[in-house]
């Protein structure tokens, strides 16, 4: 004798199968389309400090930089990686912005540090007293950088797809308050003032990102406890035989510091 399942049970089973198929299709669709990702910015985004620049030796783009790591972790996404060592806000607009199009759905950047000559300031600290220069730069941050940041953020928003995710990342504090070879020539007072400059820069960038409607993720907390001379540094100190690597995030700084900031927004 043939057994018949109740109609309600059959319908329930069919519904569950349909839900599973739709979910699988949706997941496949997301993976197939992914994000159209454009990585803009300066050396903190290109990967200076990671010691390997096989993607572009001139701009020092690295496979260990957070944009490339994010792309590798998101199959189906595309990556246009144009961040370049030494880039200023003006460079971003004239040389990188054309990579952002109406199909761009994700943009990340670090920018502004070169506008205020941050790297040169720290090198000055190594060679001579930089205390007054740090004070002046900190006091003039808003007037030096504010309008330039507004231009960058608004231009990127205007060129990207409507609703694109635009993530601005900040800069970490470099110094832990301890001394080692990595802080050669830099006094405790200069370290403190350099960190105060990083804090002020963090505030200025955060305020303008908020005003311009882009997402800001501070690196101050993310790199907390991992500055130069700490027990587990994620930032290079002074590299005597390769000075260009100095005072930039290491490979761990990108994978454990910057990458989680981006994934906290994107998943």
Image (cartoon, grey):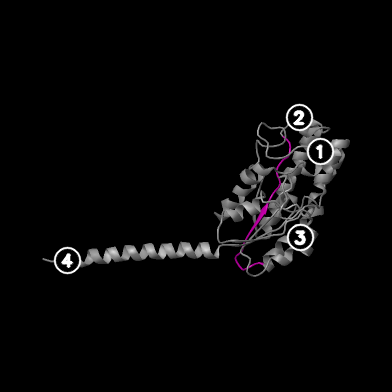
- Which quarter of the rendering shows the N terminus? bottom left
- Residue most extreme to the right: 128
Q: Residues within 10 Å of mark 3 (few under 14, many from 20)?
A: many
Q: Residues within 10 Å of mark 2 (few under 14, many from 20)?
A: few
The secondary structure type at the circle numbered 4 is loop
The residue tagged 1 is 241
The residue tagged 3 is 92
Residue 113 shown left or right of residue 167 in the figure: right
Is residue 167 shown in magenta? yes
The residue tagged 2 is 180
Question: Pointers 3 and 2 in contact (CB under 8 A)?
Answer: no
Position of 162 relative to 110 (above/below) = below
Q: Is 140 in front, or is 233?
A: 233
The secondary structure type at the circle numbered 1 is loop
Residue 96 shown left or right of residue 129 in the figure: left
Q: Who comes first in sequence, dot 1 or dot 4? A: 4
Q: Is 49 in front, or is 110?
A: 49
Q: Who comes first in sequence, dot 3 or dot 2? A: 3
* Inter-mark Cα distance, 1 to 4: 81 Å
Question: Pointers 1 and 4 in contact (CB under 8 A)?
Answer: no
The secondary structure type at the circle numbered 2 is loop
Query: Magenta segment, which residues?
Result: 160-175
Q: Quadrant of residue 71?
A: bottom right
Q: Is 71 in front, or is 263?
A: 71
Q: Who comes first in sequence, dot 4 or dot 2? A: 4
* Inter-mark Cα distance, 4 to 3: 69 Å
Residue 4's disc is 4
* Inter-mark Cα distance, 3 to 2: 35 Å
Q: Quadrant of residue 228?
A: top right
- Which quarter of the rendering shows the C terminus? bottom right
Residue 20 shown left or right of residue 180 in the figure: left
Viewer-nearest of discs 4 and 2: 4
């Amino acid at each position: 004798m043939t057994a018949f399942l109740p109609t309600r049970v059959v319908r329930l089973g069919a519904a569950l199968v349909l839900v599973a198929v739709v979910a699988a299709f949706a997941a496949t669709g997301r993976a197939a389309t992914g994000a159209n990702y454009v990585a803009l910015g300066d050396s903190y985004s290109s990967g200076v400090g990671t010691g390997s620049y096989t993607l572009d030796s001139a701009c020092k783009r690295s496979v260990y930089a957070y944009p490339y790591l994010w792309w590798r972790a998101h199959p189906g996404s595309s990556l246009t990686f144009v961040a370049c060592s030494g880039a200023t806000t003006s460079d971003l607009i004239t040389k990188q912005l054309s990579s952002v199009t109406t199909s761009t759905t994700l943009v990340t950047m670090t920018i502004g540090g070169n506008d205020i000559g941050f790297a040169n300031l720290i090198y000055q600290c190594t060679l001579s007293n930089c205390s007054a220069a740090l004070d002046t730069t900190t006091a003039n941050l808003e007037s030096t950088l504010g309008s330039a940041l507004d231009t960058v953020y608004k231009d990127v928003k205007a060129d990207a797809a409507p609703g694109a995710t635009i993530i601005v990342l900040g800069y970490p504090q470099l110094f832990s308050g301890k001394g080692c070879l990595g802080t050669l020539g830099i006094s405790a007072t200069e370290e403190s003032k350099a960190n105060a400059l990083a804090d002020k820069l963090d505030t200025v960038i955060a305020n303008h990102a908020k005003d311009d409607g882009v997402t800001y993720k501070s690196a101050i907390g993310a790199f907390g406890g991992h500055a130069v001379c700490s027990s587990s540094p994620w930032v290079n100190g002074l590299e005597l035989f390769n000075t260009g690597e100095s005072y930039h995030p290491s490979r761990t700084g990108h994978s454990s510091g910057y990458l989680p900031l981006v994934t906290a927004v994107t998943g």
